[in-house]
Image (spheres, rainbow, N blue to C red):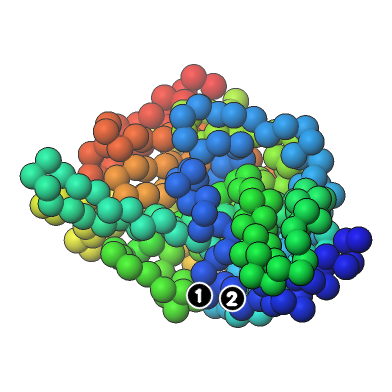
Amino acid sequence: MAECLLNHLKNMKALQGFKLKKAILFTCFLSFFLSFSQVSISENHIGKLKRHSKKKFEKIKSSTTVFILSDCIEKSDYVKILNDVWKVTDFILLHEGEFDSSDYLDKNYTFVNFDWIHQTMTNMSGGGSSIVHHFMNFSLFDYDNFVKDFSKIDKNDKLKLITKGNKLYRKNISMFGSINLYPNKEYVDISYNYVNECEIFYNYNLGFLKNYFQKINDLITKSESYWLFDNDYSKNIAILKEKTLLVPMYMSEKYKKNRSNIPISIGKDIKYLEELFSNYNYKFEFIPVGELSARIVSGEDCIYLTFVRSSREKFIQVVNSKTGEILYRNYIADFMSSVNLKPRHINDINKAIQKR
């Protein structure tokens, strides 16, 4: 039965032609429910944490993960980090232009791909402004439910086969996690021609990806949900009493608000970065993000800071490069947020270290 249904779909080309660069079929209908955190594994992505069910985790673990990633990095380099940290499922690595959804209809699959949300905001005077959120999406194709639903369609009605087949495909794709991306320039509109350039995103590099994938792999393995709209720290943050905190120099970028209250970059300012750390009581070092990425990929045991801005929200993390453990995290909400980081935000890391 399943093979017959699959042949119906492929013969009708009902799910063909949805190339990733044109549209991400299985995420565009979920976009309004996504979180904008650095790493999130949760059933819902607004409000409070809602944990995935045991059944959902088992389906994820039994799937094959298809990583659909930018061709700005060689496949062999992606495979190297995935072999190091992705143990929870088998995986397939594709560059974006190689993906065709009709090739992945025969069993449960987990997809990892780029996506974005374009939001239009209206102010009190009736004016509008646009915000684009960029992220990597983790979604599950539930093959068993798809086959069950598809078997009810009248195969003699070709139009219904196409329209309902696509609807059922979207119905059986569910997002379960995300990684937020931090662009180094402002966009109103975006095409995937931009996404293929690694320089566009401060945190899209092999080192950061290695630790992001490592964290998500560990969460899935343990069947644990994770909510980034929290502020907490591990007892292991005390390691910074001895070790140097590595700080990526992209954090020197400053912003101002435009008339619509949207942050706009005004360039990098090293004095601003120095001021942020003026009251930090332990050892730290400013480092180019490329050098930091290389040290993470090499397996060096270091502690580093990551910062992601999603419109007016901010996310700060301290990460162990060897284990991928998040030692400290601070979510700064939109309504509480100044346009730039302040020394007090770094001083909060001080306080966490001192308490341990």
Residue 169 left/right relative to 272: right
276 relative to 84, above or below = above
- Mark 2 belongs to which amino acid? Lys
Per the image, the residue denoted by label 2 is 19
62 relative to 239, above or below = below
Residue 22's disc is 1
Q: Is the C-beta separation of discs 1 and 2 under 8 Å?
A: yes
Residue 20: horizontal and vertical position, in percent?
A: 57, 72
Q: Residue at x 30, y 37 (%)?
A: 334
One can see residue 195 in this view: yes
75 relative to 207, above or below = below
Out of 347 and 263, give the one closest to the viewer: 263
Residue 97 left/right relative to 132: right
Residue 217: horizontal and vertical position, in percent?
A: 72, 47
* SS class, disc 2: loop
One can see residue 321 in this view: no
Out of 95 and 82, give the one closest to the viewer: 95
